[in-house]
Image (spheres, rainbow, N blue to C red):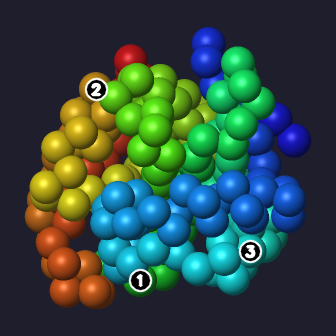
């Protein structure tokens, strides 16, 4: 099911058939270094991620979703809003996103993140929404700041690694 659309991207619910593409992207160490514990995902974890996302659509109305390039129809990443029970504030929803390195630098994260934040804030009624970003991930910091998120603090995650915490509230105009 299609959730969102931008000039170059379609965001849709994950389907079981997406496991191979999700694995291709998230087994890449370059992608994994800024996600979760920093370890590449196994195929089995990708299958489980899709299953959990499908349950979240039903139970919460949102979750991690597939990002598809309009021009090719190829799944090139994911974006969504989730609850992370491992975080210090598990009751606050978090925006997540990741993309195939072959499309990095094309502004696709800057295109989809404000649209996903708007979806979470306006259509799902969530607020605030946070983002957790590794301090060395300067590109991701620029993406969320450009989307209107504001730096709040640095904290140590459950895996012992530092994260920068950004927030956005509903009354903020999205770029």
The percent position of residue 133, horizontal first and vertical second, equals 26, 57
Residue appearing at x 85%, y 64% in the figure = 16
* Left or right relative to 4: residue 135: left
Reading the image, the residue beneath label 3 is 47
- Binning the other alpha carbons within 10 Å of mark 3 as few (below 14), some (14 to 19) or many (20 upward) gives some
Vertical comparison of 109 with 87: above or below: above
Q: Quadrant of the N terminus?
A: top right
The percent position of residue 9, horizontal first and vertical second, equals 64, 25
Vertical comparison of 86 with 15: above or below: below
Q: Quadrant of residue 135?
A: bottom left
Residue 86 is marked as 1
- How far is mark 3 from mark 2, CA to CA? 32 Å
Vertical comparison of 157 with 106: above or below: below
Residue appearing at x 86%, y 59% in the figure = 17
Residue 54 in view here: yes
Vertical comparison of 93 with 8: above or below: below
Which of the two discs, 1 and 2, labels the residue nearer the N terminus? Answer: 1
- How far is mark 3 from mark 1, CA to CA? 20 Å
Reading the image, the residue beneath label 2 is 146
């Amino acid at each position: 099911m299609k959730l969102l659309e931008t000039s170059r991207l379609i965001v849709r619910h994950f389907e079981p058939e997406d496991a191979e593409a999700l694995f291709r992207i998230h087994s890449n160490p370059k992608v994994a270094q800024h996600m979760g514990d920093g370890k590449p995902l196994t195929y089995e974890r990708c299958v489980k991620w899709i299953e959990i996302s499908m349950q979240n659509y039903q139970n919460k109305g949102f979750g991690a979703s597939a990002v598809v390039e309009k021009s090719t129809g190829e799944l090139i990443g994911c974006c969504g809003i989730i609850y992370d029970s491992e975080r210090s504030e598990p009751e606050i929803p978090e925006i997540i996103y990741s993309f195939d390195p072959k499309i990095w630098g094309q502004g696709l994260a800057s295109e989809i993140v404000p649209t996903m934040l708007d979806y979470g804030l306006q259509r799902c009624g969530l607020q605030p929404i946070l983002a957790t970003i590794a301090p060395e991930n300067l590109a991701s910091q620029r993406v969320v700041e450009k989307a209107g998120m504001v730096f709040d603090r640095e904290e140590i995650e459950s895996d012992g690694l530092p994260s920068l915490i950004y927030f956005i509230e509903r009354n903020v105009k999205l770029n």
